[in-house]
Amino acid sequence: MVLTKRIIPCLDVANGRVVKGLNFESIKDAGDPVQLAEKYSTEGADELVFLDITASSEQRETIKSLVKKVAEVIDIPFTVGGGVKTLQHARDILLNGADKVAINTGAVKNPEVITELMELFGKQCVVVAIDSRRNYNIEKGKNIFSEDGKKFWFEVFIYGGKKGTGLDVIDWAKKIEELGAGEILLTSIDRDGTKDGYDILLTNEIVHAVGIPVIASGGCGKPEDMIDIFKNTEVNAALAASIFHYETHSVNRVKEIIQEHNIPVRYWSGFVISISYATSHPKNWDSWFGKISGNISKYSFDIS
């Protein structure tokens, strides 16, 4: 069976608003998180990621009330991260409507928490976010690469991209898989907000280093960028923000374009549906199905 590729909008949230920046800096407002979440869910997003991007640097927990409001208006898998350090933090997020918990700084500071989360909530709930930046100061023992005549290695960053850790991204990815991570959300800080496309080299290296699903993030500016990452790597999903927030393309239109290039996506003529997920999460199934039941003859299914 051919596995479909997932298209995932991301809500980077600061002070209760969705924001977008360049290389994790120069932040500007992008809209209301609840309104955008509902819009993306209706347009056919496969999943939604919500990241409280200042929670770790401000030494606080994710805004749970906002997580709950978002969860109430969507019917797709929902990953939430930001400031997660303990099992209780994760439990609170899940109890407020999230399906998965993303952890970055907390995992680097206390790697054992990955295993604890996996044992308590299940591997499928544990997403480890990795923020990566190229480091051109060559160090012994790192995985070294060369591009455009320059040598570098990929370093793990924490606290919203503000602090380097000295950890090699590839080594860290292997370790978190061993500890029990169910998925990796891989963000290139170098590409973040540039709209120059995903870091194919970085993504390829991580996909080949681990056996768990990987989500590519950072750099998407047009549908062709998603096509490139899917054609040139075996990544499982592509996450994007700017392309959706500023209405350059709808989620549905992006999927149409991707499908035209023979890349399998869950697509239903303007509506995407995962039957297995919908039937196991019947929050608003009646109203959801009601949206399309009257015109069902117009649609063709591609359910994977």
Image (cartoon, rainbow, N blue to C red):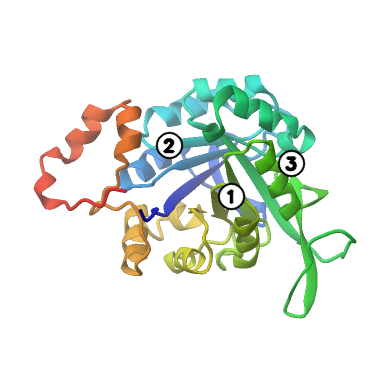
To which residue does mark 2 refer? 77
Of residues 130 and 122, which is closer to you in this image? 122
Category of crowding for the residue at label 2, using alpha-carbon neighbours closer than 10 angstroms: few (below 14), some (14–19), many (at least 20): many
Q: Earlier in the sequence, mark 1 or mark 3?
A: 3
Name the image quarter holding residue 58.
Answer: top right
Q: CA distance from mark 2 to mark 1?
A: 21 Å
Q: Earlier in the sequence, mark 3 or mark 2?
A: 2
Q: Which mark is residue 211?
A: 1
Q: Amino acid at mark 3?
A: Tyr
Q: Mark 1 or mark 3, which is nearer to you?
A: 1
- Residue 199 visible within the image: yes
Coordinates of residue 275 in the picture (x, y in percent):
29, 38
Seen in the picture, residue 16 relative to 191 is either above or below; the reply is above
Of residues 229 and 233, which is closer to you in this image? 233
Residue that lies at the very extreme toward the right in this rendered image: 140
Q: Amino acid at mark 2?
A: Pro
Of residues 183 and 94, which is closer to you in this image? 183
To which residue does mark 3 refer? 159
Coordinates of residue 286 in the picture (x, y in percent):
22, 28
Q: Which mark is residue 201?
A: none
Tell whether label 3 touches label 1 (CB within 8 Å). no
Seen in the picture, residue 86 relative to 209 is either above or below; the reply is above
SS label for mark 2: loop
